[in-house]
Amino acid sequence: MLLLLAIVIAAVWPVSVRASEPPARVVSLNLCLDQLALALAAPGQLVGVADVTQDAHLSARWQQARTLPAVEMRVEEILALRPDLVLIDANAPAHVVALLRRAGVRVASVPDAATFEQGLARVRAVAAALGHAEAGETLANDMQRRHDEIVSTRGSGQPLAAVWQANGFTVGAGTVPDDLLRRAGFRNLAAERGTGPFEPLPLEILVRAAPDVLILDGATSDRPSLAEALMTHRAVRHAFEGSRTLVMPHSLWLCAGPQNLEALERLTAAHRALGRGS
């Protein structure tokens, strides 16, 4: 009943925004798209973001996100914010997209991004949807310039890296971390083993493979769980000491975007440190 009422209310709103005009009220419903929208939207243009974007562990723009209403993937919540545009990812539930469009709300579906180049395309796509194509082009060009500067500082050789997350999960080919590792000059243990994008890596295999650097998924939380226990296992602490361990905040490379440049800087610095034998 509530859903029906929300659709009826939305359907009678006057559609005052033409496709050629920037939308006045935008709701973004994807962690990765939200962060780009927060970077590109005009003041007051973004009126709601996905609730997960307010999580400091996952989002590089969590502080900005917490100044806006947190929205779950429920049509009632979305329509209550009276958006004239909703940003949504290509994997969003089809029924949500259909109901929003039936309610007269424009929906921009933006493809996923698993590489730096795809991230640049996403920046431009989100900026265009917001009506700020020029700002998107400027940001994308700045990202490319900084990327090229960072990559030019990496060391020689291709040391082996392994990413190890909670529950012993790792990241294989087809992910942002794998793409950034390659750009920084590393080989990715998971990719070389044919591991899927997100699959567990047994502790025994990790230690036996003896990667040159172990990348941990940020610091453990304030309330450590069994899922995080493997990250601090004594076998791991013994095998990877000093410069052989790198802490990478999850928020820096979970999504493709400007925050990847800080991740790339950390990776290239680790690569140089290995070359110096420090």
Image (cartoon, helix red, strand yellow):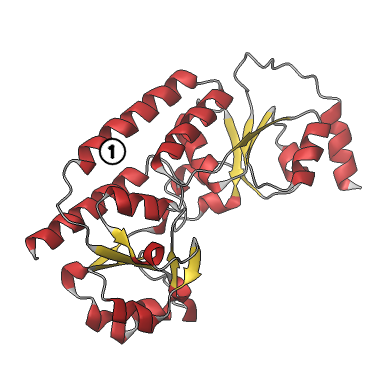
Q: Position of residue 102 (x, y in %)?
A: 83, 33
Q: Position of residue 137 (x, y in %)?
A: 41, 23
Residue occupying image coordinates x 85% and y 36% = 7
Q: Nearer the viewer, residue 277 or 166?
A: 277
From the viewer's perspective, is residue 59 above or below residue 241? above
On the rendered structure, is 153 left or right of 135?
left
Q: Nearer the viewer, residue 124 or 69?
A: 124
Q: Quadrant of residue 202?
A: bottom left
From the viewer's perspective, is residue 275 above or below residue 123? below
On the rendered structure, is 255 left or right of 161?
right
Give, as a three-letter code, the residue at label 1: His
From the viewer's perspective, is residue 29 above or below residue 170? above
Disc 1, SS: helix
Residue occupying image coordinates x 76% and y 45% = 94
Q: Quadrant of residue 69?
A: top right
Q: Position of residue 97 (x, y in %)?
A: 75, 40
Which residue is tagged 1? 147
Residue 67 visible (yes or no): no
Question: Label 1: few (<14), some or many (≥20) within 10 Å?
Answer: some
Residue occupying image coordinates x 73% and y 48% = 93
On the rendered structure, is 91 left or right of 217?
right
Residue 151 visible (yes or no): yes
Name the image quarter holding the C terminus: bottom left
